Image (tube, grey):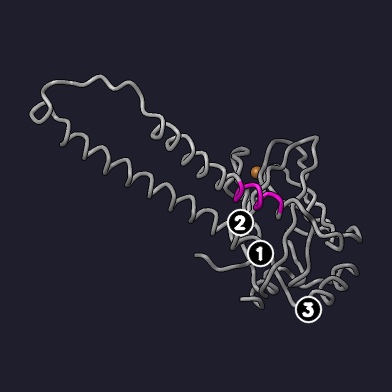
Amino acid sequence: MFESSSPYSDFVDATFLSIVGISLLVLLGILIAMVFFVVRYSRKRNPHPTNIEGNVPLEIAWTLIPLALFMGMFYLGWEGYRQMSNVPEEAIPIKVTARMWAWTFEYPNGVTTDTLFVPVQAPMKLTLQSLDVNHSLYIPAFRIKKDVIPNRENVLWFKTSAVASYDIACAEYCGLRHAYMYTKVVSQDSAQFEQWYKAISLGQSKPYQALLDSTK
Ligand SMILES: [Cu+2]
């Protein structure tokens, strides 16, 4: 579940787990305090209520502790966003077009495919555009999801760390056959990729299913 397959999947997982951890600690703290107050200050033990005027140290504590927690979470989110937005200059540009209900990937030489083939370890820059409605490019293994909006270009980048294939889905409900908007990222070693790229540029590529099988 927490296998690293893109440059920032580890960071996203660590952020996710630390926020879940903080939430659990806070939940536990609130529960313990609640049970303590229910027992200690029940009407039986404490028949006469006291008016409390305020407590400066306590107020400072319950302001500063949540502030520190939120700033910590903000930092993790910001850092993750920064990593995802800083596209390496040498990244290979791919134009991704979404439409009801399919993905098209266009390589620098103008060749288009329905499956995204990439060389392993090479940074890829995906420019996303939609021909009709809102879609969202989602690659769960890479911890990436980016909306694809008509009349607007969004950009994402990634780099694969292993020779393997990964699912691509549409994560924005886009009509009747939305659930069929599945395809794959197929990461190959660079020699294999070069060969495929040359073949497909000459119009003699193998059917993609054969390539998918070879990466299993
Ligand atoms: Cu879609």
Q: Is residue 15 magenta?
A: no
Q: Which residue is mark 3?
A: 192
Q: Which residues are magenta?
A: 75-82
- Residue type for callout 3: Gln
- Residue type for callout 2: Arg
Q: Residue at the left extreme?
A: 44
At mark 2, the secondary structure is loop
Measure the C-alpha gap from mark 3 to mark 1.
20 Å
The correct choice, above or below, for 78 with respect to 12 in the image is above
At mark 3, the secondary structure is helix
The correct choice, above or below, for 45 with respect to 35 in the image is above
Does the image show residue 115? no
Who is closer to the viewer here, 205 or 1?
1
> In the rendering, at what x and y percent does residue 66 appear?
47, 39
Closer to the eye: label 3 or 2: 2
C-beta proximity under 8 Å, tags 2 and 1: yes
Q: Which residue is mark 1?
A: 6
Image-based side of 194 in relation to 72, left or right: right
The correct choice, above or below, for 46 with respect to 111 in the image is above
Residue density around tag 1, few if under 14, some if 14–19, many if 20 or more, within 10 Å: many
> In the rendering, at what x and y percent does residue 144 appear?
64, 53
